[in-house]
Structures are given as C-alpha cells and as structure tokens.
Amino acid sequence: MNVFVIGIGHIGGSMAIDIKAAFNEAKVYGIDKNEEHLDKSLSLGVIDEKSTYSSLSEADVVIIAIPVDVTVAELPKVLDEVNEHCLVFDVSSTKEQLCKVVSKHKNRRNYLATHPIAGTEFSGPEAAIANLFRDKTNIICEVEKTAFKLQEKAMNIFNRLGMRIRYMDPESHDKHIAYVSHLSHISSFMLGKTVIEKEKNERDIFDMAGSGFASTVRLAKSSPAMWAPIFEQNKENVIESLEEYIANLTQFKELMEHNDFSKIFQEMKETNYIKSILKGIA
Amino acid sequence: MNVFVIGIGHIGGSMAIDIKAAFNEAKVYGIDKNEEHLDKSLSLGVIDEKSTYSSLSEADVVIIAIPVDVTVAELPKVLDEVNEHCLVFDVSSTKEQLCKVVSKHKNRRNYLATHPIAGTEFSGPEAAIANLFRDKTNIICEVEKTAFKLQEKAMNIFNRLGMRIRYMDPESHDKHIAYVSHLSHISSFMLGKTVIEKEKNERDIFDMAGSGFASTVRLAKSSPAMWAPIFEQNKENVIESLEEYIANLTQFKELMEHNDFSKIFQEMKETNYIKSILKGIA
C-alpha cells in the first residue's frame, strides 16, 4: 500500500507513524514544500521516502495535512492526479469550503472529508507521535459522496488507528466546531495577549502563575500558520461564537460592577455542569 | 507540634498530609463547619482529631484554608485565641483586605499572610493529596509584620513542603494575581457557559470536543463557593483585567470582520511568546 502524506507535521506525521505500525505492507511517501521538514521526517523514520505530485498516480492513499487555505487550493490538483482506486482524505479543521470546492470534480468519489479531533498545541515533524489518534473522534462529512470501496478502505485505516467515527454534514461540522474548538483557541490567545501586555516588563510575575493559567493559555502556543486560515474559512461561525462569548464576559463584568455576587455564584454553579461533559475527554 | 487546620479541603487537607509526613512530632487537629468534611478527613487519615476554636490556645500552628470572605471574618477571632508562640497563616488567593483587617490587631505579629499557588479545580477533603506544594510558588506578604521566630517557623514548614518563596506587598499581589489567575477562571467559566448555552440540546456535539477545549474550560469545574468571594474581594483589579481581555477579544473580532487575517496571524505569532513564559509552570 503506497501512502502519500502531503504535509509532514503533527497530524500528517503522526498518521504516517501509526499507518506504518498498523500495516506491514504500507510504504509512506512524504510531500512537503518545506524541504527541512521532509529531511527531518525522513531522518526520524516518520516517512520512508520523499516524493512529489508527479508520483501521485502510484498512490493507494493520499492524506492531505496542510493548512486549510492551502488544502482548498491543493485538493483539486491532487484529485486530478490520482488513479481511480486511490483514497484521498484531508484532516483539516473546517469542512464546508473544502466540500464545496470539489463538489463538481470528476474524481469527487475518490475524496473523503475527515476531521480527526486529535491535534495539540504542537506542530512540525518533531511533534509526530505514535498513537495520537487512539480513542479520538474522527468526524466524516458527506460520506455518501465517496465511493463504497474507498469508504471501506478509509474505515479500515481509522479503525486500526483506534478512532471513533461520527458522521456530520459540513455546515453543521463548521458551526459546532467553532464553539468546541475554534473559540477556545481565540480565548486562549487573547488571554495570553492580555497578560503579556500587562506584565511584559515584570517577568517575575509569571512566577505567580500556576497550573490553572498554564491550562487556559496552553492553546496560545499553537501555530498561527495553521490557525489564521481556519478562522478565515470559518469566519461567520467564529464571529458568532465570539460575540456570544464577549456578551457573557461583559455580563459577568456588569454583575461584578453591581456587586451581584450571588448571581455570579449561580452562574458558576450552573457552568460546573461542564464536569459531566468533560468526563471522557482527554 | 500541635497544628490546627481550619477548613479541611483541597489546600488545607493537602497541607495537613504533607506536614504529618514531614514532621514526626506533628499532630493535626481539624476544624470545619462542615461536619461531613471533618468525618471524611478523619476517616481518610488527613487529620488526627476533630477540634474547635476553644482549643486554639493549645496550637503551635494554625492554618486557615477557607473561602476568602470567611477568612476575613475569622482571622481576627483566631488571633484572639492563640498563644504568643503560635504561628497563624492563611492560604487565600487575595491578600490586601486580609492584611488590612488585622493591621491593628494586638496579635498581628502571630500572623503571616501567604498564598501558595498550588490549587487545582478540585475541592473538598477527598481532593487532599500528598506533595501538592512541591516546587510551587508561595507568595508571602508583609513578612516584616510577623515575629522573627514565627517567620522562621513558617519557612521551616514551607521548605519541608518544597515550596519556592516570593515576597510581595499585598496590593501588588492582588493586582498581578488578577491577571495570572483570577482572569483565567472567568475566561474559563464564560467559555464553558457560552458553549453549554449553544449546545445544551445537542449533547452529541461534545464528542467533537478535544483536549484543547478540555484544557481551556478545566477551571470552570472550580468551586463557586471559593471563587465568588475571591472576585468580590479583588473586584477592582479583576474588572480592570476583564476590561482589557474583552477589548482584546473585540479587536480580534473586528480584525476578522475586516478580513485582516495577516494582522491576526501577527497577533498570534507575538502571543506565541507565551511558550517561553510557560516553561517551568506545571
């Protein structure tokens, strides 16, 4: 099985590692515009060989793991190159625009739109690790538009990687993921920004920061090259979620200004419900 | 050494455990208005005996680990009861009001204002664990107002528990802790609220949440009984930090509305600086 991974970073590289471990017959070819990343992933044993688009016709599986804006540009080109038995899937955090851009492509049936919810704040080939996808959710959109045999091929891979499968339409995916993922990244980046601005001349202050602060700003370590395009592609949904978040923060501030700490207590009490939601997530 | 712990929860209980482990001669007495918590901590071996304020005159050390509003009310009463060799310290997250309330107390020299930055989202005696304080920062305010011998007694305890000591005036403590701790809790609670409100009828959606979401809303599991009084006592500083946070979020939203994703990229890139700050924190 010839597996071509385009973009050997945290997700693409981790997938390469798991596929090589799960399928004896798999050979993983890496494609990346960053030559250093390619060399690094070769020396780390994440990929078996470097490759280019001109070899894509030999692929049995192509995995696209690059920023979402680049994916929108590259996916049609990849579909142009592959043979009729090749499965192409991407792993990006937005799905609507991507599904739209290939909806009329003659090889649409080779493509499966997926979003494995497994990323962390790390990026690059050094962040490729084994078993990243075990017990993680993989959201699949428009499954009915993919050829049966290629659906089967994809499920076989995802099962061997240990993922839970959920099916969803791309519009719903993008709407909900704005709340449970994209908004978290903005809240974290802006929290980091607020504190850095305040304390930039007082580095000692960070000695006062505990594990709670570390946890809430963890996502502010994430790659801007990955996240700016996600916010752009999911603009409407993200803005809506941000507006609701800002409204809630403003209301909280007003409650404080009016010394209504019993209402603040109540709000927090109700939000403690998050405990039951978080059971089972990382 | 008779150690009285008032409030046997996550912090008070964990301190009891470590002190018993570090000092053979220590006997830990628990005082708590919640009788269930007392029984629980006795059966867990967190304390040696239940006690009451009427025995405080026999104490060598009193640790106050109750919500900050109750601490303000109780600290003067505790100082009324203790003998001249007794060290009294609290562990609360705000320091200014507390230092003020005892500034004229005849036994002010028995008191040391401390804030061990070691809490988590857990609470209650079941959350008492060993080694919670190892390598954590302990902020001490107005050290010069505590009797020399009692400063020494306190340092001996904190060293044996493995804490780093930092000295600070109570006003600075409360100002900075608003940014590196209190604001994180509000950002987390309001993020949890925003997502719960949006998705309350669609529980499946939380299957889409990954470790990033879990990390940013972790603090929304925290105890409202502990946090509402903290926000109340540190009202001015917390409101200021909230205003700056809301302004940054609003600016981010406006950049999105104006499609200025290169500026968004830049903002995130600069905030990635948080990586170097977080090194060494949990």
Image (spheres, coloured by chain):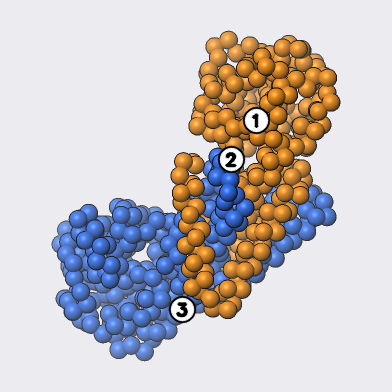
Chain colours: A orange, B blue
Q: Is residue B7 left or right of residue A41?
A: left
- Disc assigned to residue B170: none
Image spot of residue B96 (x, y percent): 46, 78
Residue A98 lies, in percent from the top left, at 77, 33
- Indicate the secondary structure of the residue bearing disc 3: helix
Quarter of the image with the N terminus of chain B is: bottom left
**Hey, what amino acid is under mark 3?**
Glu
Same subunit, labels 3 and 2: the answer reads: yes
Residue closest to the eye, A69 or A51? A69
Residue under label 2: B208
Asked whether residue A188 is in view, the answer is no
Q: For marks 1 and 2, give the CA distance.
A: 11 Å
Callout 2 amino acid: Met
Q: Which residue is mark 1?
A: A140
Query: In 3D space, how far apart are the residues under numbered discs 1 and 3 (Cα atoms)?
Result: 53 Å
Residue B174 vertical placement versus A112 (above, below): below
Instruction: Quadrant for residue A195, please give it.
Output: bottom right
- Of all chains, the one bearing label 2 is B
Report x, y in % for residue A58: 73, 11
Between the C-alphas of marks 3 and 2, the distance is: 43 Å
Q: Is residue B107 visible?
A: yes
Identify the residue at image location x=56%, y=71%: B238
Q: Residue at x 67, y 39 (%)?
A: A173
Tell me: B258 left or right of A129.
right
